[in-house]
Amino acid sequence: MDYEITLLTGMAIAVMFALSLNLITGFCGQISLGHAAFQGVGAYAAAMLGKAGWPFLATLPAAMLLAGVLGVIVGLASLRVRDDFLAITTMGVVFLFVGVVRQQDVLGGELGISGIPDHGFGKLGFMLVAMLACVLVVLLSVHIRRAWMGRVFNGIAEDEDTMRVLGIDVPRYKLAAFAIGTALAGLSGAFLAYHLQFIGADNFGFIESITVLSMVVVGGIGSVPGVLVAAALLSALPAWFQFIGDYKLLVYGGLLFLMMRFSPEGMAGLVRRLRGAGAAREGAR
Amino acid sequence: MLIVELVAQGLVQGSIYALIALGLTLVYGLLRILHVAHASLFTLGAYVGVLLANAGAGLVPAFVGAMVVAGIAGVLMYRLAYQPLLDKPPFVALIASIGLYIASEEAFRIAFGAQGLSFADPRLQGQVALGGLHFKQAELMVMAGTVVIIGILAWLQSRTRIGVACQATVTDPQMAESFGISLRQVRDINFFVGSALAGFAGVWVALLNNLVEPTMGSVPSYKALAIIVLGGLGSVPGTLAASLVLGVIEAFGTIYLGKLLDRNAIAFAFLILVLMLRPQGLFARR
């Protein structure tokens, strides 16, 4: 049972993290190759505060606030550069994060932070709390998608300049996307810190940023159910692939490539296409 | 004296960056793809070079072999992976490229082992004194090699039909096509040349460190992406200048800012700073 609980907790955290990026990249069309940095900020904030004696639940808002504030600062960059330039800038952010954390003894330096205190919920309780938070993030995503804000995000993703012409305050909405998305990444980071009980800069590097982006893209960029399923599956993949052991990353990289090559709209697109084909067949009958 | 030494170190590193980034910038200029898997070709070149050298081939055949194999692999990569994705949103090709890179890194590890390979008989390791500075032979050679290669490339670009066709295609693909330029051919050639340059750089790095590892491509590949952005995406002279500048900045940064940031963070802090001040890159004419 222990193994399943750990796995499910990990999945819930991954889903939160992927949905937080989906808000920025999926909904609002602002690509980020450095999202793990914000999860890292949340994780380090929660770990430091937890070690200073704060209870787990109290560290959550602090982690979200800090990650969100830094997210807005990085979001300012998205007002200055677009597309590929933004991709590279955000990639720079994650290298900067790792580089800074590694050199600071206060943050544990190369060794990372260990001995993060217990959350006090027990393993099962923690899983339930993580799942609850995950459900809240899902609901928030669905809500934003349907609300006015989500439509504006969509408009910005489709055609930023037209939105400007329509009199929409594009910078404000972009910053809002970054603020919410990075704050949620911080939330997932706080959970991750308490889940692992040990964190280091390498938990939040470029590879992790790419991994979460691949969850969003494989799920179907912008699709909440797609990203949810993809994040849950991909986060568990390494554990399920134990039997292929050495070939794990080979298969992972290969899958990523094949998915993009043959179904760039991700799983959501695949489902839509299959449904479309089914409906067409129904119609023919 | 320290300053001169740091500049020299920076230029050696910058030459390597230039060789990797030039291929990347050729691809970007033509297809607007952030080609992360370029680093796979760099690593592939290094492996081919070491394997050939250890099989008894001279250094020159090792270089030629590495460039040809990397070049062909690059063309195959374009044909099989990128060509079908050209009309998709750019992040699709980016993720596909990252997937390819991860898979290839693992393939190298499985095929040749995680410890990496070394030259059985390391060459160009001798020290040379030059104006009070000490260089490895390989360090001087890589700088010279970069200058020669870039010279040849510049000549090809401006003086041959193929080169002019490439330039025309970058500027306006449709117009170039209606003037009878085969886009397919231009893209193949571009991938071949760019990938061969990556293979060339791979052998140099293998010589400099006397080590070829599966992961040797990761950091240079991310840095090369930063460099082509600094150089103003798709501009060859800009990329060259940005490579050298970044090499020198890193050399100074690790001495003076080493307590605060590591080498990669210095490079990317510089990148972010530049992009915020000049969003079009350091050397773009716009």
Image (tube, coloured by chain):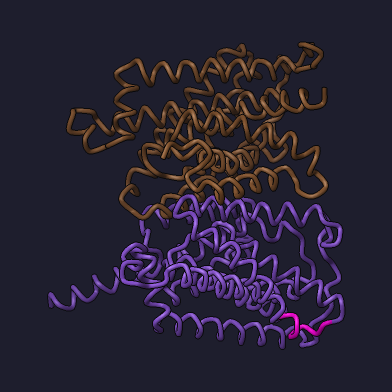
Chain colours: A purple, B brown
**Image spot of residue B263 (x, y percent):** 72, 42
Q: Is residue A42 left or right of residue B187?
A: right
Q: Is residue A190 left or right of residue A80?
A: right
- Location of residue B117 (image quadrant): top right
Question: Is residue A59 on the magenta stretch?
Answer: yes
- Location of residue B240 (image quadrant): top right
In-front residue for pair A127/B240: B240
Q: Residue at x 63, y 65 (%)?
A: A239
Q: Residue at x 62, y 42 (%)?
A: B218
Q: Which residues are magenta?
A: A54-60
In-front residue for pair B139/B172: B172
**Image spot of residue B159 (x, y percent):** 35, 15
Question: Is residue B237 on the magenta stretch?
Answer: no
Residue B107 in view in this figure? yes
Q: Is residue B159 left or right of residue B14?
A: left
In-front residue for pair A196/B190: B190
Q: Is residue A107 above or below residue A110?
A: below
Q: Is residue B202 left or right of residue B182?
A: right
Q: Residue at x 18, y 73 (%)?
A: A280
In-front residue for pair B31/A272: B31
Q: Quadrant of the N terminus of chain B?
A: top right
Q: Residue at x 64, y 74 (%)?
A: A188
Q: Is residue A227 above or below residue B282?
A: below
Q: Is residue B231 above or below residue A119?
A: above
**Image spot of residue B264 (x, y percent):** 69, 44
Residue B44 in view in this figure? no
Q: Quadrant of the C terminus of chain B?
A: top left
Magenta residues: mostly which secondary structure?
Answer: helix
**Image spot of residue B23 (x, y percent):** 48, 31
